């Protein structure tokens, strides 16, 4: 049987849809199965991004107040710039954005330290592009996390 069929013909566990009881997202990264320090859920990550988009939209609107008659492109650029700016300023300093703080999650490097500003910039741009953040591996890390060597973890139980 070809290898590409073996995953879906072998069942949901082989395809990564379900997990064995002794397996969890983050196990291969040395992270706990539950509680603080465990890999954050997709719902927590999504909620955090939506909250950050709201904050960035407000910041973008404030930035556009100084511009006489800003066009649609300028309004969108200000919002996207504010979104990426949240990542660049806050991730190296606090490890989280306002949305992440609300959701009880944080970003850290695989060694537990905070991201540097360049990694935070790259991660922010990739999250703004949306697609790299939507697809995660079996450890719960998206392409944006893999490229900068980060993981999103829970900060509370």
Image: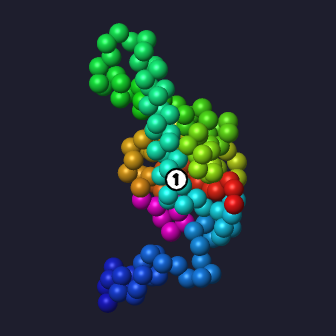
Question: Camera-side residue: 151 or 86?
Answer: 86
Over which residues does the magenta segment extend?
Answer: 135-141
Q: Left or right: 137 with respect to 119?
A: left
User: Residue 42, position in %: x, y?
Assistant: 50, 59
Q: Quadrant of the C terminus?
A: bottom right
Q: Left or right: 18 with respect to 77?
A: right
Q: Residue at x 63, y 51 (%)?
A: 104
Q: Quadrant of the N terminus?
A: bottom left
Q: Residue at x 42, y 78 (%)?
A: 15
Quick one: label 1, few (<14), some, or many (20+) residues within 10 Å? Answer: many
Q: Residue at x 68, y 39 (%)?
A: 94
43 w.r.t. 53: above or below: below
Residue 135 shows in this picture: yes
* Residue at the far bottom in the pictured view: 1
112 w.r.t. 71: above or below: below
64 w.r.t. 97: above or below: above
Question: Camera-side residue: 140 or 75?
Answer: 75
Quickly name the residue at label 1.
Answer: 45
């Amino acid at each position: 049987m070809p290898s590409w069929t073996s995953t879906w013909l072998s069942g949901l566990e082989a395809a990564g849809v379900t997990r064995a009881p002794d397996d969890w997202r983050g196990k291969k990264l040395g992270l706990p199965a539950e509680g603080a320090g465990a890999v954050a859920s997709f719902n927590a990550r999504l909620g955090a991004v939506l909250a950050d988009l709201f904050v960035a939209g407000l910041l973008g609107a404030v930035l556009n107040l100084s511009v006489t008659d800003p066009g649609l492109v300028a309004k969108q650029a200000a919002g996207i710039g504010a979104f990426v700016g949240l990542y660049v300023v806050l991730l190296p300093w606090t490890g989280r954005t306002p949305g992440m703080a609300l959701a009880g999650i944080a970003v850290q490097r695989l060694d537990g330290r905070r991201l540097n500003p360049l990694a935070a910039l790259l991660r922010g741009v990739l999250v703004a592009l949306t697609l790299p953040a939507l697809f995660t591996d079996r450890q719960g890390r998206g392409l944006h996390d893999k490229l900068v060597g980060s993981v999103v973890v829970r900060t509370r139980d």
